[in-house]
Image: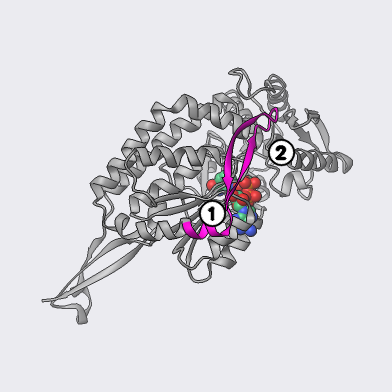
Amino acid sequence: MAKDVEIRSPFDDSVIDTVPEHDEADVRAAIGRAVEAKPIMAEMPAHQRGRILNNTAQLVEKYGEDLARLMARENGKPMKYTRGEVSRCVETMTFGADEARRLHGETVPMDAAKGGVGKIGYYVRVPVGVVGAITPFNFPLNLVAHKVAPAVAAGCPVVLKPSPDTPLSAFRLRDIMLEAGLPEGAFEVVNGGADVGQWLTTDPRIDMLTFTGSPAVAHHISKAAGLRRVALELGGNGATIINDDADIDRALDRVVTGSFAYSGQVCISVQRIYVHENVYDEFREKFIDRTNALVVGDPLDDSTDIGPVINDTAAERIEAWVQEAVNNGAKLAAGGTREGRLIRPTVLENVTEEMKVMCMEVFGPVVNLVPFSDFEEALATADESEFGLQAGVYTRDLAKAMRAVERLNVGGVMINDVPTFRVDHMPYGGNKNSGLGREGPRFAIEEMTTLKMVVINT
Ligand code: NAD
């Protein structure tokens, strides 16, 4: 039987709520309920799937302030960002609803092949079956929405395991979706750590796996998936290039936000900023001023820019990586101190590509400034990463912008914006160790459906 566990705020350790920690029998039973919901979801008409998702969007909006507070308490994200996450969840659900209504196949010109003459052919998209979803702590509402909205739109039940640090938003969203009209069993939430994840991923009744989290865990999921379909949304060490023809003042606010929003605990956070030497001093000075002006503190306070990182282990790791860089010659241009889980936004200079803060994913409020003299070399250095999620390039030169689009091996190139830019209907995902497949309801639905070909012999 599940035992109850307390979920505490990473800011002040206050108890927010208790939730069940599920054991193997609970997980198997949840999967069983999802299997029972499989025909119900597969046969549900598109207009009904669309309506449930539209209803969900309306309810998320209605309960928005409560959801924003819940997230600020459970993962320490400042209210100014959790309110944004609620709005994005409304949009993700709405995009899911739109896609549910236009999910279709197409006809195939059979007579284009000699053997196809006299035949009518078309294909339809059919739901893949039960989706097993695993999500991280950093967007506990909208990343859950990115699994559930396409699953419902595609006609699939979903069994979701949220991060054990932040399960409350997922349980709340499940309740909201039931209120919105989703049948029992169509959205099951199982709570726990790696063991719950393993029971979920190895259960043969799960037809498809979708995971958002770190590359290390993705390797386990990928192995467990075997011949089943798997979608992986993983990490990065986002690069931004500031060329000397860029509008520096336009770039600054975005680059500061992209570096430090939610304490850098964002997969597309800015981690490496390559700045042309002609504008380096100007950019550096303004960037550091703005960084030092950020307010670190209570996530429930509307003026707070930077709250705590998720737990002590993360805080200690981030501090150790900064220390390692400094020990090897990096210079602290801002920050570098911490009080418990509150880490002051940190800017490093004089770094090398081999330092952990450069080549690994920091997932904390730490950013590196690196001067360059040649744009092509900056592109090459930015691209020399095991990751390939998104990149940002600031330039007014169209030819340089298009060269960056061509050269960078990433899932998305943002011209005159930071890699941190995302709206929820765009295809989103990474190359190399940043993942496999794309999210955004339309694209996730492609992963959650299979094609069924029909040939009619006339
Ligand atoms: P994590 O990989 O530690 O955990 C993610 C989830 O996997 C959690 O629910 C965790 O309990 C579960 N898990 C752990 N071990 C497991 C196992 N053996 N089998 C199955 N499940 C297991 O990640 P995190 O610390 O919660 O989140 C941070 C990571 O997520 C970063 O790498 C970040 O870049 C990535 N991320 C990626 C995206 C994206 O869309 N690309 C979005 C957000 C976060």
Q: Which residues are magenta?
A: 1-29
Measuring 34% from the left and 54% from the top, which residue is drawn there?
154
Q: Position of residue 363 (x, y in %)?
A: 67, 41
Residue 423 seen in the current view = no
Q: Position of residue 311 (x, y in %)?
A: 71, 38
Looking at marks 2 and 1 on the same chain, the residue that comes earlier in the sequence is marked by: 1
| Figure colour scheme | one colour
Question: Assess mark 1: CB under 8 A from ligand 1?
Answer: yes
Residue 243 image position (x, y, % from top left): 62, 35
Residue at the disc numbered 1? 211
Q: Quadrant of residue 261?
A: top right
Q: Amino acid at mark 1?
A: Phe
The answer for how far apart the CA atoms under marks 2 and 1 are is 21 Å
Q: Secondary structure at mark 2?
A: loop
- The residue where tag 2 is placed is 311
- Residue 128 picture quarter: bottom left
- State yes or no: residue 150 in magenta: no
Instruction: Name the amino acid, label 2.
Output: Asn
Task: Kindly identify which numbered label has been placed on residue 65.
Answer: none
| Disc 1 element | strand
